[in-house]
Image (tube, rainbow, N blue to C red):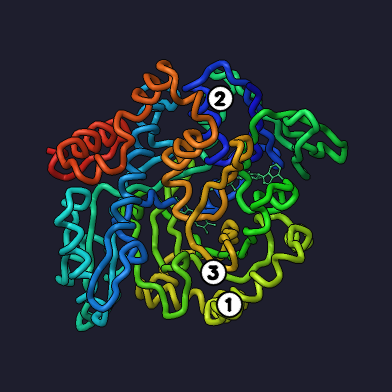
Amino acid sequence: MNVVVIGAGIMGTTFAALAKEMAPDIDITILERLDSVGEGNSSAFNNAGTGHEANCELNYTPVDEEVISVEKALKIHAQFNVAKQYWAYLVKQGVIEDPRTFINQTKHCTIVPSQAIELLKLRHREMSAHHFFEQMRYSEDFDEIKRWIPYTMEERPRHEKMAATVVETGTDINFGALTSQIATHLVRNLGVTIEDGIHVKRAHRSPSGSWLVEAFRHGELVQYKADVLFVGAGGGAFPLLKKSHLPFRSRYAGFPVGGRFLQAEISEEEAKHYTAKTYGKAKVGAPPMSVPHLDLRVVDGRHYLLFGPFASFNPILEKGRGFTDYLRALRVHDIPSLLSVAMEHFPLVKYLLSESFKGSQSMFEELDQFAPGMSKKFDWKPIQAGQRVQIIKDGDLQMGTEIVVSEDKTYGTLLGASPGASVSPEVMLRCLEQMLPSVCETEEAQQKRKEMFPEDDLDTLINNPERYRAIRDEVNKQLGIVSSDQSD
Ligand SMILES: Cc1cc2nc3c(=O)[nH]c(=O)nc-3n(C[C@H](O)[C@H](O)[C@H](O)COP(=O)(O)OP(=O)(O)OC[C@H]3O[C@@H](n4cnc5c(N)ncnc54)[C@H](O)[C@@H]3O)c2cc1C
């Protein structure tokens, strides 16, 4: 079987790696538009690098009339645990020699002002009762919060009442570095071909039933044939779906959301002083992906603070691509969907437009509200983040991701943006199950799967504390993540 993957980000490379591990006989070619792998949204500073496991993001635990829903948080935490199993496998196999090249332990904290203290208390009570979050601690004590996350408290007046939670075993992840290491493994050990500098323009069925992929390399047309096609092209997946002639293509359109961060390089000493990712509460009207957070980032052995994201309206498919690519991807049938979303979500559109014109001064003011005095402490500069293209499906705006697979299972694509990279091995495993069921069912494939994922059943992880704890402790050991009760 001949498989073509479009896009060499964390999704495309993980898809190829899992498929090839389970079915070594498949031929896989990855086609990438850019000159190297992992340079799209997966690149270190195009995203925030949070290993999302619902420790600190309030938007994963919505509250309705004082009733908190933790289902989404449990699912994301379980998916992240499955993701860590695969990364621990790569470390155990020696594919990744040093886990610190891509994953580094940081505290995951949430901080809120007085008006949201009851909400955080409720969240802590509900979540810490579950084995996933049994290590979460809560405090309203000024000095204790200052010890956890000094930069958010050092210059805050003592009379300002705050509350915070902390989970010590959170992570910062350089998904770009992880993608590169998986790509090297694909080429060196698994026999996958990766061709970069190839911009796929369209893929359509040939009369023989296989997919004909038309692409350009330095302006020259090149063609590939595939029995099965997986499109892991980020925002670039939308135009390819539109041109696929698949019947469900008209149900989907893309809603682009751009973003910026404030970034400051800091010393190793300063990084030791603030080893945390601290999430706050989103402003009223702000989309979930613009929850403010102040993060320690570790990239190529250097340390940075990142604050943001500042979401914006930016009608492009991917960072670095032009507005006309986005326009060309639209079809007449998309216009009613876009108009209905613009009307129904008018406050969101207004918010994104106003944020687009925000200058550095306003960004610094927001930073100082979050962590008083921080704007003066370091040399901050605004940087352009990656581009999210959210899904509009049947006229409804959605914030998550969706795997879309054709009825005959020969075309699969991942649309949407969140929670994304953190759960990529789990999401790609489900994608493989849908697209290549016969390949996944052989005895050899099942055996390999158990090696890579000792426990990938989310319900078991959610409902069986002993099984979960055993897996968690084992993978954390492989990945260099230590909880305080293990450190003595
Ligand atoms: C501002 C921001 C913050 C984020 N923060 C986090 C976070 O903290 N934690 C987290 O887990 N996730 C986060 N994400 C989401 C995360 O970045 C994505 O889920 C993840 O990178 C998606 O991986 P991908 O492989 O699908 O996309 P990409 O990494 O973008 O890869 C897609 C690849 O396809 C290529 N491509 C596109 N079109 C074509 C074409 N026509 N032909 C050939 N190649 C093509 C692109 O060049 C690109 O390399 C964030 C995203 C953004 C934008």
First along the sequence among labels 3 and 2? 2
Amino acid, disc 2: Leu
Q: Nearer the viewer, residue 153 or 350?
A: 350
The picture places residue 443, in percent across and down from the top left corner, at 40, 16
- Residue 429 showing in the rendered view: yes
Q: Residues within 10 Å of mark 1 (few under 14, many from 20)?
A: many
* Alpha carbons under labels 2 and 1: distance apart: 41 Å
- The image quadrant where one finds the N terminus is top right
Q: Disc 2 designates what residue?
A: 186
| Tag 2 secondary structure | helix
Amino acid type, label 3: Ala
Residue drawn where x is 77% and y is 28% of the image? 208
Q: Nearer the viewer, mark 1 or mark 3?
A: 1
Q: CA distance from mark 1 to mark 3?
A: 11 Å
Q: Which mark is residue 311?
A: 3
Total numbered circles: 3
Q: Secondary structure at mark 1?
A: helix
Q: Indicate the quadrant where residue 386 lies.
A: bottom right
Label ID, residue 370: none
Mark 3 residue's CB less than 8 Å from ligand 1: no
Question: Which percent across, then down, holds residue 316?
Answer: 69, 61
Foreground mark, 2 or 1? 1
Q: Residue at the spot x=38%, y=78% of the render?
A: 369
Sequence-first disc among 1 and 3: 3
Q: Which residue is mark 1?
A: 349
Task: Say if mark 2 contacts mark 1, CB within 8 Å.
Answer: no
Mark 1 lies within 8 Å of ligand 1 (Cβ measured): no
- Left or right position of 94 against 184: left
Q: Position of residue 401 (x, y in %)?
A: 50, 53
Which percent across, then down, holds residue 160?
A: 23, 81
